[in-house]
Amino acid sequence: MTTTTTTTTTATAAAAGNNVIAQMNIGLLPGVPPVESSLLIADRMQDKICRFLAIVPRGPDYLWGLRRVDATYAHDGRTISEPTLVVWVNAPADLVRGLARIVCAVASQDCVAVRWPDGSGELIGPRADQWGEFDPAMFIRY
């Protein structure tokens, strides 16, 4: 997986409680073949996701940050390049899973890859089963 970084980071102070620091990979081109307007579509999708994340409470209990990368991966025998948001979230695991489901709806994505602190991960979303198992080698870390 090749990554070229354009960093956009937002973060606040330390968190507590039953929180985990999870990471998510969120594609920005849902079902869109690469075309000249792909970057404009990706920019709009990033804007939608950031507007959603902006309403998620942040503070000492829930934190998040993000950066944008260009990801290259294989799916259904094709090589796909897609602008991707790499998001870290410090929150309870159930909230992280809920955020992933909502982000799928906001971003019109089949699924979001979530990596847990122990290195395990899962694909969460309405069509996660179409993408196979979580592959840690393909995951882009924050």
Image (cartoon, rainbow, N blue to C red):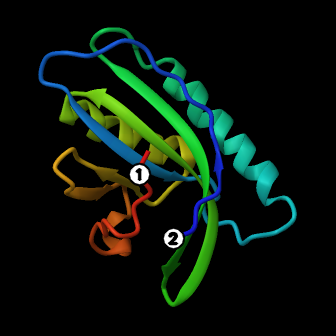
Q: Residue furthest bottom?
A: 77
Task: Give the quadrant of residue 15.
Answer: top left
Compared with 54, 34 (above or below) is below
Identify the element where label 1 is drawn.
Answer: loop
Identify the element where label 2 is drawn.
Answer: loop
Amino acid on which disc 2 is placed: Met
Q: Residue furthest right?
A: 36
Amino acid on which disc 1 is placed: Arg
- 25 vs 37, nearest the viewer: 25
Q: Residues within 10 Å of mark 2 (few under 14, many from 20)?
A: few
Instruction: Answer left or right for 39 relative to 115.
Output: right
Residue drawn 82% across and 69% down?
A: 35
To which residue does mark 2 refer? 1
Q: How many marks?
A: 2
Instruction: Answer left or right for 89 relative to 92.
Output: right
Q: Position of residue 5 (x, y in %)?
A: 63, 50
**Residue 141, label in figure:** 1
